[in-house]
Every structure is written in C-alpha cells, then in structure tokens.
Image (cartoon, rainbow, N blue to C red):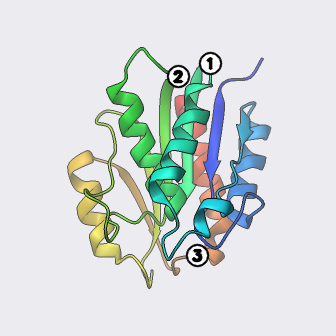
C-alpha cells in the first residue's frame, strides 16, 4: 500500500518529463509514494506567464481527487501553483485530501499581475530549494518570504533552473517525504 500521493508540477517552458520533476518522481516511487505529473503546456502557451488561474484550477482538481496523504511539489511556476493550491486546500479543511507537505524549487514569491504574493498554509511542513544566483527570482526575496512562514530553506550555488542541483534537490525532497510519511 502506498504511503501517500505526490503531485509534481513543472515550470513554464517545461513539461511533465522535465529533469527535476522526473527526478522527484523517481524518489517518490522509491519511497513508496504514488505520483503524477500534470501537463500544463497547453495553459502555458496562453501568454508570457501562461494562464496561472487555469493552472491552479487544474492542480486543485487533481488534488481533490486524492484520497489519503498528499504532498505538492513544483518548480518555478509549478512551485507557485503548488503553494496556492496548498493554501486553498488548507482553507477547505475536511473537504479534500490530507495535505502532508509542500516542496518548492525556485519559487516565484510574487507574480506580475497576480493579486497576492505566493501563499503557503501555516503549520504545513514546507521545504524550499533556491539558487543564490537565480536570475529571475532574487534569493533575498525568497529568504524574506520564507522567514514569516518558518519554511526550511536550502540556498545553493546555482541559477533559476537549478541544473547543477537536480540530484541534491531530489535528496532534499526525499528528506521531506521521509519526514511526513504516515
């Protein structure tokens, strides 16, 4: 029997077979978690930032279908929508899955045109990996975002795509899954 379920959300200009979400999927499977990787490419083609609201709705619908413990994970725009959906699920307590954790890689803490900063429910195990040299999202902004929600933050010597830290990120994700496993 599976320990729980993980939904892995890819970033813009990426897809469900992307390097980072594929590495996380292998970790989840090895640790006894089921997983899925929704495809948002059709929504991402709708503009510079794609259709953020439709991405959130798609992920929310997938999350509501989960029975048992759920971990949301994502990279870049996938991290943003994972945080948004986690916050929504926390507000719908009892109506959805048992939200067990949140894993964010290179999260945009704010989006131009989006009405609020990145959301994260209080008290949820939250682990963030971010690059010191991220050319899109300054590390300082992520540090400032993590502080009030007491997120565990791992800053690495890398850029936005975290290309030099795929295996490291997968190892950190494994730490989170072990920590929240039922």
Q: Which residue is mark 1?
A: 67
The residue lying toward the viewer, choosing from 126 and 156, is: 126
Q: Quadrant of residue 138?
A: bottom left
- What is the secondary structure assignment of the residue under circle 2? loop
The residue lying toward the viewer, choosing from 16 and 40, is: 40
Residue 173 in the image, given as x and y percentages of width and height:
59, 49
Please name the residue shown 53% across and 30% down the image.
Answer: 180
CB under 8 Å between discs 2 and 1: yes
Quarter of the figure with the C terminus: top right
Q: Residues within 10 Å of mark 3 (few under 14, many from 20)?
A: many
Vertical arrangement, residue 111 with respect to residue 98, above or below: below
First in residue order: circle 3 vs circle 2: 2
Q: CA distance from mark 3 to mark 2?
A: 30 Å
Q: Residues within 10 Å of mark 2 (few under 14, many from 20)?
A: many
In this rendering, position of residue 54 left or right of residue 65: left
Q: Residue furthest top?
A: 94
Q: CA distance from mark 3 to mark 1?
A: 32 Å
Q: Which residue is mark 3?
A: 161
Residue 99 in the image, given as x and y percentages of width and height:
48, 28
In this rendering, position of residue 141 left or right of residue 128: left
Please name the residue shown 52% across and 37% down the image.
Answer: 60
Q: Which residue is mark 2?
A: 97
Please name the residue shown 78% across and 48% down the image.
Answer: 26
First in residue order: circle 3 vs circle 1: 1
């Amino acid at each position: 029997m599976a320990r729980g379920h993980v939904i892995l959300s890819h970033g813009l200009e990426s897809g469900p077979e992307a390097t980072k979400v594929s590495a996380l999927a292998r970790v989840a499977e090895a640790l006894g978690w089921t997983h899925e990787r929704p495809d948002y490419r059709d929504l991402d083609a709708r503009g510079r930032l794609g259709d953020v609201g439709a991405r959130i709705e798609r992920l929310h619908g997938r999350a509501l279908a989960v029975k048992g413990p759920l971990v949301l994970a994502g990279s870049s725009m996938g991290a943003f929508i994972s945080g948004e959906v986690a916050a929504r699920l926390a507000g719908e307590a009892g109506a959805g899955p048992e939200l067990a954790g949140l894993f964010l890689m290179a999260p945009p803490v704010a989006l131009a045109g989006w009405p609020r900063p990145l959301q994260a429910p209080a008290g949820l195990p939250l682990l963030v990996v971010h690059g010191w040299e991220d050319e899109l999202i300054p590390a300082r902004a992520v540090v400032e975002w993590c502080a009030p929600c007491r997120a565990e933050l791992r800053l690495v010597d890398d850029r936005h795509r975290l290309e030099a830290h795929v295996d490291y990120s997968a190892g950190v994700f494994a730490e989170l899954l072990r920590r929240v496993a039922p």
